[in-house]
Image: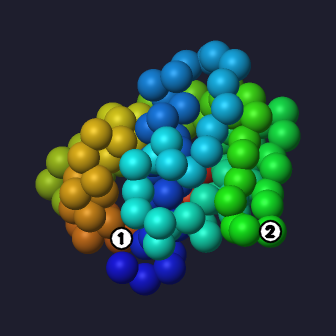
Amino acid sequence: MNNIEMSELVIAKILGLLLEWGLSERTLQFHQLGLEDEYQPFFATSVKWLEAEGIIRTTNVQTFISGGAFVVGPTLTAHGLALMGKRMSIGEITTTIGEAVLQTRKETSYYTGVGDLAGGFVGGLFKSLGGG
């Protein structure tokens, strides 16, 4: 996997977890994503990107010199929830972004198929953000 694919997987895992949590007051740390340590450098940046795009909101994102991060109060925004309902095509299959991230949350290998067939999860997300 290259860096953008690793970032996409981290983003999919974050969104899947937040979708499962709903609108609850929680904290998020990298280890909760269930990914190998090689993905950790992409965690804080992915959270900040999702927040900058208006997909999630947080109360605070603490980053540490060690490379770790602690996210306080992450939730999907109304825009993020609407985005989860948007349809995207994965090869011959049409699914919602929410279904794709929940499946990726449960089974990381599902993401590989999404990335291979759809040109990347973030590519599909960008397309949905653009309305196309």
Real-space Cα distance between discs 2 and 1?
A: 33 Å
Who comes first in sequence, dot 2 or dot 1? 2
Amino acid type shown at disc 1: Gly
Describe residue 130's horizontal placement relative to residue 7 as left or right: right
Q: Residue at x 55, y 19 (%)?
A: 22
Q: Residue at x 56, y 64 (%)?
A: 40
Residue annotated with mark 2: 65
Neighbour tally class for label 1: few under 14, some 14-19, many 20 plus, Cα within 10 Å? some
Residue 69: x and y, percent? 71, 54
* Residue 7 vs residue 29, the one in the foreground: 29
Q: Residue at x 70, y 67 (%)?
A: 67
Amino acid type shown at disc 2: Ile
- Quarter of the image holding residue 60? top right
Image quadrant containing the N terminus? bottom left
Residue annotated with mark 1: 119
Residue 109: x and y, percent? 22, 57
Q: Where 17 sits versus 41, above or below?
A: above
- Whether residue 31 is visible: yes
Residue 125: x and y, percent? 51, 54
